[in-house]
Image (cartoon, rainbow, N blue to C red):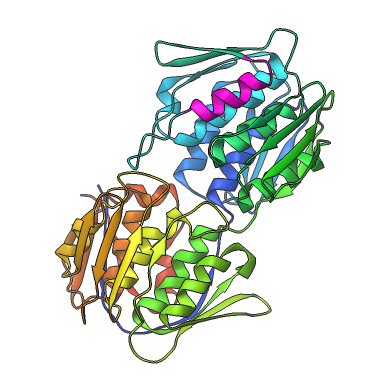
Amino acid sequence: MDSILVTGNGPLKGQIPIAGAKNACLTLMPATLLSEEPLTLTNAPRLSDIKTMTALLRSLGAEVSSLQDGQVIAMSSHDLTSQTADYDIVRKMRASNLVLGPLLARFGQAVVSLPGGCAIGARPMDLHVEGLEALGAEIELKDGYLHAKAVGGLKGAVHEMRFASVGATENIVMAATLAKGTTVLKNAAREPEIVDLVECLRKMGAQISGEGTPTIEIQGVDRLHGATHQVVTDRIELGTYMLAPAICGGEVELLGGRMSLVESFAGKLDAAGVNVSETANGLLVARKNGRVKAVDVVTEPFPGFPTDLQAQMMALMCTAEGISVLEERIFENRFMHAPELVRMGANIEVHGGTATVTGVERLKGAPVMATDLRASVSLILAGLAAEGETTVSRVYHLDRGYEHVVRKLEGVGAKIERIKDQ
């Protein structure tokens, strides 16, 4: 397996282009299943997870073409041959479950394997199932597969989710676009990826209002048509690269960045002593004077602090002045990067869902191992600020969520290289 070698090399300076959002694109791609007409996505990220979703859609009979070096995805589901999402593909990636709602809405039936592809918690499907059952679906779990059917089609309903799940919100909203009547989804997730999905569905002819708020209303229509849609900027990649100059100094402009995507996160950086300002082309990030200050973090659904930036924020706090407390409220088992940071000289104590970080003057390079997607990039960030060399192994996780990491960091002066497995 490949590894990444990082050598602490002082301040960074330059520009980093931010890709389209992985989590948005993985949600938009299954929307093609709702229509016979073509759906084209621009500003698509070039990631292994996108390839996995492509394989899944093709297994159902959809046509999927990657154009312009992978930044345009052209899809058509005019002649699907299957409504079964097999375990062999679904197990690789959590987002595969997002074919359930569209297949059920358009064909009245779907068989979807329980998903996998994640080491940070169970992420059960119960909220998806409850929402679809509220729309009249009958769903049974047999041999690891969800067997869903809606005799006579789905019907609009009022449904309140027990938790503001992003994936469940996306599945239910897509299914409701073709349901008979009006659906009111309460306690809906508010993430930018959901707003982006709704904007795309609206271009396809869906009648939806309330996206970005806790209550989304969907008026079902008979059919959806084709559309072209630009994938929203990836706020997690944006936040990750905002931390690069924060952790090792310098000034970096993140092209395509928008403050509205990362307001809560930017607020924490400001409190820690990092300037974030808007420019004509994106966001400019520069550390203020001296060491950053310790700040406490609690992960919450949007617009709160993102769980997907918790590992990277911990890397910053490792060299902050003072003691910070990071509380993880979204996923269990999401501090697996902490022992690896300790190998680099960090002072971290983990108790359940809380990590206490006492800042040290300087981290030291060490061989470390990535345990999941966000953990892998947190170790790279730590390596940028460490004394000596840091080798991050098992970086295949990284390819699921970050395109051209080495190239982007090299472009602002980082000393980093990918070492191919011999």
Where is residue 320? Give x, y as percent: 30, 78
- Asked if residue 113 is positioned above or below residue 334 in the image, the reply reads above
Give the quadrant of residue 254: bottom right
Residue depicted at x 40% and y 16%:
144
Question: From where the camera sits, is residue 328 visible?
Answer: yes
Where is residue 202? Give x, y as percent: 80, 41
Taking depth in this image into account, of 115 and 398 the one nearest to the observer is 115
Outermost residue on the top side: it is 151
Is residue 127 part of the magenta span, yes or no? yes
Is residue 271 part of the magenta span, yes or no? no
Position of 414 compared to 411: left or right? left
Position of 157 compared to 166: left or right? right
Taking depth in this image into account, of 99 and 309 the one nearest to the observer is 309
Residue depicted at x 24% and y 76%:
359
Where is residue 63? Give x, y as percent: 64, 29
Give the quadrant of residue 318: bottom left
Where is residue 251? Give x, y as percent: 47, 84
Q: Which residues are magenta?
A: 125-137
- Asked if residue 166 is positioned above or below residue 181 in the image, the reply reads below
- Asked if residue 214 is positioned above or below residue 135 in the image, the reply reads below
Residue depicted at x 40% and y 50%:
329
Main secondary-structure element of the magenta-colored stretch: helix
Marker count (numbered) = 0
Position of 280 compared to 191: left or right? right
